[in-house]
Image (tube, rainbow, N blue to C red):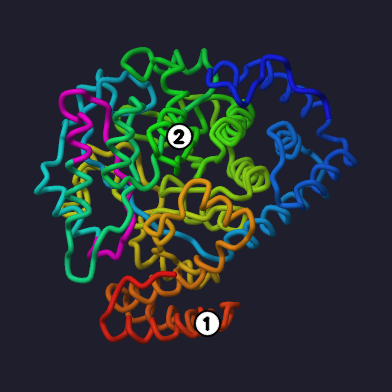
Amino acid sequence: MEAMTASYNPKSLAACEFISHEEIIDSLDWADRNKNNASLIDEVLRKASEKKGISHREAMLLLDSSLAEQNEAIFRMAKRIKDEFYGTRIVLFAPLYLSNHCVNGCTYCPYHMQNKRIPRKKLTQEEIAREVAALQDMGHKRLAIEAGEHPVHNPISYILESMETIYSVKHKNGSIRRANVNIAATTVSEYKMLKDAGIGTYLLFQETYHKESYKRLHPSGPKSNYEWHTEAMDRAMDGGIDDVGIGVLFGLERYRYDFCALLMHAEHLEAAKGVGPHTISVPRLRAADGIDPDSFDNGISDDIFAKIVACIRIAVPYTGIIVSTRESQASRQRVLQLGVSQISGGSRTSVGGYELPDPDNDTAQFEVNDLRTLDEVVNWLIKLGHIPSFCTACYRAGRTGDRFMALCKSGQIQNCCHPNALMTLEEYLIDYARPETREIGEKLIQSERGSIPNEKVRLKVGDWLDEIKEGRRDFRI
């Protein structure tokens, strides 16, 4: 394996050093030169079989591999690692868009400040409460808060008040147990406020790590500062948020460049902060108001997308991989086998789209490709052999950050996640599911509960499942 370039320092807190352009270019060149080197690819796969991860350069080689036999082995390895770390569980969530007011000039997003066609909207706390009730009526327990960057309309005080509202709504048997937050890069002091308010995971996508492309795509607004944005996760962790989620928007820049840089960012968090990203998201550019994906010339095929997911799973086996309703049902089904552990369901990407769906989608951030209801998604997952999970237990039990990663890397997390998934699925089946979904879901639970390895836990879960049927809620290991 070639030595890394001198400019690359994963422990550095400077974006230009932990995302080293020179190291990325060298890695891409090395991978391209070795993409037909079967013995070297096999060597990387043997290392990957230890389930401790591989470097960005090694992952780049797997992504570039043009050998059919090795490519089949890559996909088998990704599935094996995903099954051993996460089993068949798939965690479900929904985005909640609070406001589309924004002062940035991002050329790929309809919320950019120059867009005068879309109506600007910001939810009141009363409207947020109704949105949350509508999401609870669907069965959701986990949300991802989304809002544009605007110092007047969307200050940190508005986000904090919104989180308080979200957690306060108890509707029928519903409650939101984890609110992840996807808002613009901010200060350590404001990250501390989010931590104190009970944030789940802090999500922030880089869009692209290519600095010159980043500047071109972000011509104005606070987000145009590449360093401020790229170094945000370090500040979030300094503010006490130990679960962070990174990602890029594939289609903006050449996928090989951003794939390599994304893994370098994960390496940096592990090296500098002692814990890697809790999740990695892999959205692809989609159509929106005034945004034509075909005007960007870096789109990727479904085959490349699937291989990206597989190689991320191999490179960072412990992290959750998220695929949203940007992807079609067929695309999501394919990558579920290769590493994805979280998906959204029944999503609306418009501001206030759950209580009163927006027929024109005129406040939507992007077009949704998977339009199925949450129940249809749950039903589909069960039929595919997955366990739909609404679990939020680790966060509420303090198993976050390095504590979560230690459990995940050791494989012990399955002793918690598997029974918790079954119990939260039982809650969903009783409170929200259609008869057909409940029938196949109950059969799944009965077949899976016997596979809980610890006898005491297995018996306890059996008792708790009976209590859930009698009306009690929110048991967790």
Along the line of sight, which residue is nearer the eye, 401 or 300?
401
46 with respect to 471 (left or right):
right
Q: Position of residue 377 (x, y in %)?
A: 41, 63
Q: Which residue is found at the position 44% from the left and 85% from the top?
A: 462
Give the mark nearer the N terminus: 2 vs 1. 2
Q: Position of residue 237 (x, y in %)?
A: 44, 34
Can residue 72 be seen by looking at this rendering?
Answer: no
| Secondary structure at numbered mark 2 | loop
213 with respect to 235 (left or right):
right
Identify the amino acid type marked 2. Leu
Q: Which residue is mark 1?
A: 456
Q: Which residues are magenta?
A: 136-160
Q: Position of residue 361 (x, y in %)?
A: 24, 42
Q: Which residue is found at the position 90% from the left and 41% from the top?
A: 39
Along the line of sight, which residue is nearer the eye, 90 or 319?
319
Say which quadrant the C terminus sits in.
bottom left
Identify the amino acid type marked 1. Lys
The answer for how far apart the CA atoms under marks 2 and 1 are is 47 Å
Identity of the residue furthest to the right in this view: 39
Say which quadrant the N terminus sits in.
top right
Along the line of sight, which residue is nearer the eye, 349 or 135?
135
448 with respect to 193 (left or right):
right
120 up-or-down from 364: above or below: above
Q: Which residue is mark 2?
A: 285
